[in-house]
Amino acid sequence: MTGHMDILKGDKLVLRGLKFHGYHGVKQEERKLGQKFLVDVDAWMDLRAAGKSDCLSDKIVEEVMEGPPKNLLESVAQLIASITLSKYPQVYAVCVQVGKPHVAVQGPVDYLVVEITRYRDLDFQN
């Protein structure tokens, strides 16, 4: 069986700096006013065949980010990853970063981001 590190050495489609206004968060003001979110997606897939890179758009990310609010960024990232893997069978691994540029935490922090990586062999055993 191929190891996960071997999988992540393959071809990759990269979406960087996707910007959305969403209402995710625990605080009442986050749910009411919303805020800007930044999303990066890396999707590992075979890019040798012409046109395969056109299959993955930012529509999945848009639907999740502008959809029903989630409390945690981890939940948002997980939903993007799971929908990507289920909708695009040619993607065999996906890494999703979801960031809050305007995070209210103590100290000199410019940016808070969560990153998750999901592999098809772990998410879809059936």
Image: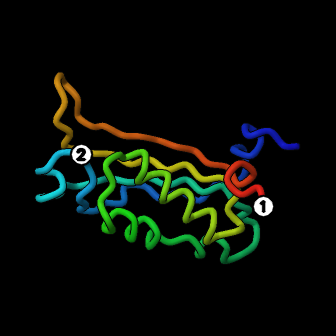
Quadrant (top left, top right, bottom left, bottom right) of the C terminus? bottom right
CA gap between label 1 and label 2 equals 34 Å
In the rendered image of this protein, does residue 112 appear above or below residue 77?
Answer: above
Where on the picture, by quarter, is residue 125? bottom right
**Residue shown at 46%/69% (left/top)?**
60
Q: Position of residue 122 (x, y in %)?
A: 71, 48
Q: Position of residue 19 (x, y in %)?
A: 30, 60
The label on residue 111 is: none
Amino acid beneath label 2: Val
**Residue shown at 42%/65% (left/top)?**
61
Amino acid beneath label 1: Asn
Q: Nearer the viewer, residue 45 or 96?
A: 96
**Residue shown at 62%/62% (left/top)?**
85
- Which residue is label 1 attached to? 126
- Which residue is label 2 attached to? 26
Quadrant (top left, top right, bottom left, bottom right) of the N terminus? top right
Q: Nearer the viewer, residue 13 or 87?
A: 87
In the rendered image of this protein, does residue 1 appear above or below residue 58?
Answer: above
How has the structure been colored for display? rainbow
Residue lying furthest right = 1
Secondary element at image label 2:
loop
